[in-house]
């Protein structure tokens, strides 16, 4: 029997090194036990000797393993090694979704990503101290070991303030330059209510949508907004048909959503996260129905949008309007935005030529997309173009390979990938333009059909 001791609950590098050595020495999964250092006994059987040789596994397994190892299931190390052992003989094993080991790995990875998204959504900071000596502190109890995974999000979102997130496992700290990790603390060390509490509660109430409340809600131990949303849960909920524009007597909750988007729009107007603001006329934020079931995400504003301050008002917007109408979607019922909120261009005389945003610019602007998504809470996100897809999925995502079918996002929202309307305008051949336009409409018809099925299922 081989007893493997890892340095920590999240020691993926240690697990990978040990697993590789075990596999190369043909040590069966049943002959291995896995422990974390603090839980290990004082005496161990010898580990496997240094290996010789090499082997490969699908990159998808490595990606899933890096996520699943953050799960609290104590058997996760053994499960990962068992799958590694089996993958050596069957590289297509991960495609067998009914396989118990594959299904368990996928479920653990999803649970970790959900916990990460929950941490992004519910952590709130309380101000300790005043003025120059102030520090912002939050308490969170994660279900899994996701603090180090989630911390970079807060570093991007709250880059201009020093903060600490305290948890029973580990604590994350940001000094304006780097994230540091320290041991966990007891809940008694968490801050008491401060002057940011009421502001946070008002914001949470503004983005809460009772129409999408699930009947089986998770534990609220981490939800600082619970006391704020309770009146919305207990109060009446007004049904609203998404097929018709809202009237001036729209429900209060829709106005609350509008307040949240307006707040985000005002904040984004002063965004300096990347250099694009220097040459753009203004920030072009999203607009549309505040409780839309569909959120359309384009790439970036064009010349017309930059001058008007509104998304999709130029030639590409006109083509989008026509395609939406043919697909049976009223643009007044959707929310439209862009992955990048400032116009990137190069001047050519009096003309400003569109330039594709680069990855750092897309990443810098992604916080606004994430916050719009949290405020709108759509059922479906349609990513139009490569830049939009990169923002929605958080990585470079090929269009042709992924278009035409729904893709589940980590937070439970579904996504569709299609081309950007401006791509159709650039096609020089009339036949190709007509053909690709029809495909674009068909993609939007898939979106409309998905919502119809969802409505019937409900």
Image: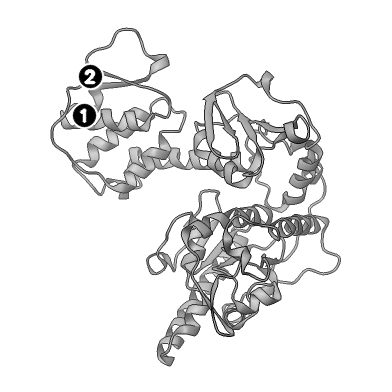
Q: From mark 2 to mark 1, how far is it between C-alphas?
A: 9 Å
x and y percentages locating residue 107 in the rendered image? 44, 40
Farthest residue, direction left: 52
Q: Residue at x 43, y 26 (%)?
A: 9
Residue in front for this viewpoint, 297 or 157: 157
What secondary structure is marked by label 1? helix
User: Quick one: label 2, few (<14), some, or many (20+) residues within 10 Å?
Assistant: some
Checking the image for residue 199, the label placed there is none
Above-or-below relation of 407 to 328 = above
The first of marks 2 and 1 along the sequence is: 1
Check the picture and name the quadrant holding the N terminus. Answer: top left
x and y percentages locating residue 451 in the rendered image? 59, 64
Q: Residue at x 65, y 46 (%)?
A: 214
Could one spot residue 378 in this view of the protein? yes
Residue in front for this viewpoint, 286 or 73: 286
Q: Which residue is mark 1?
A: 21
What secondary structure is marked by label 2? loop
Side of 3 relative to 429 (left or right)? left
Above-or-below relation of 88 to 366 = above
Circles 2 and 1: CB distance less than 8 Å? yes
Q: Residue at x 23, y 22 (%)?
A: 31
User: Quick one: label 1, few (<14), some, or many (20+) residues within 10 Å?
Assistant: many
Check the picture and name the quadrant holding the C terminus. Answer: bottom right
Could one spot residue 392 in this view of the protein? no
Farthest residue, direction front: 349
Q: Which residue is mark 2?
A: 47
x and y percentages locating residue 86 in the rendered image? 23, 38
Farthest residue, direction top: 42
Residue in front for this viewpoint, 224 or 348: 348
């Amino acid at each position: 029997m081989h007893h493997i001791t890892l340095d920590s609950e999240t020691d993926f590098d240690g697990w990978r090194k040990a697993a590789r050595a075990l596999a190369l020495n043909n040590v069966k999964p049943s002959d291995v036990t896995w422990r974390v250092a603090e839980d290990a006994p004082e005496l161990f059987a010898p580990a496997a000797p240094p290996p010789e040789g090499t082997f490969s596994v699908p990159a998808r397994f490595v990606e899933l393993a890096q996520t699943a190892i953050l799960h609290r299931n104590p058997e996760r190390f053994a499960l990962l090694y068992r799958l590694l052992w089996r993958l050596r003989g069957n590289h297509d094993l991960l495609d067998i979704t009914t396989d118990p080991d594959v299904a368990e790995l996928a479920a653990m990875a999803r649970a970790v990503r959900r916990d990460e998204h929950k941490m992004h959504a519910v952590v709130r900071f309380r101000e300790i101290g005043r003025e120059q000596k102030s520090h912002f502190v939050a308490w969170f109890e994660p279900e899994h070991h996701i603090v180090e995974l989630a911390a970079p999000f807060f570093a991007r979102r709250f880059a201009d303030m020093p903060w600490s997130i305290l948890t029973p496992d580990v604590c994350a700290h940001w000094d304006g330059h780097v994230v540091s990790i320290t041991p966990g603390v007891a809940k008694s060390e968490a801050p008491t209510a401060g002057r940011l509490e009421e502001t946070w509660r008002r914001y949470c109430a503004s983005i809460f949508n009772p129409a999408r409340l699930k009947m089986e809600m998770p534990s609220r131990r981490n939800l600082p907004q619970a006391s704020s949303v309770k009146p919305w849960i207990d109060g009446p909920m007004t049904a609203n048909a998404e097929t018709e524009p809202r009237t001036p007597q729209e429900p209060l909750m829709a106005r609350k959503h509008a307040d949240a988007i307006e707040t985000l729009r005002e904040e984004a107007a002063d965004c300096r996260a990347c250099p694009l603001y220097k040459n753009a006329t203004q920030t072009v934020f999203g607009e549309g129905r505040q409780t839309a079931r569909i959120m359309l995400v384009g790439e970036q504003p064009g010349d017309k949008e930059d001058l008007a301050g509104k998304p999709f008002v130029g030639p590409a917007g006109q083509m989008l309007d026509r395609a939406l109408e043919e697909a049976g979607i009223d643009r007044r019922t959707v929310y439209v935005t862009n992955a990048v909120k400032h116009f990137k261009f190069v001047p050519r005389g009096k003309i400003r030529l569109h330039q594709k945003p680069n990855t750092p610019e897309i990443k810098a602007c992604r916080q606004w997309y994430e916050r719009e998504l949290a405020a709108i809470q759509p059922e479906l996100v349609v990513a139009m173009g490569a830049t939009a897809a990169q923002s929605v999925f958080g990585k470079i995502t090929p269009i042709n390979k992924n278009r035409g079918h729904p893709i589940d996002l980590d937070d439970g929202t579904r996504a569709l990938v299609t081309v950007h309307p401006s791509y159709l305008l650039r096609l020089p051949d009339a036949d190709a333009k007509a053909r690709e336009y029809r495909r674009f409409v068909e993609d939007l018809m898939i979106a409309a059909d998905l919502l119809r099925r969802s409505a019937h299922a409900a």
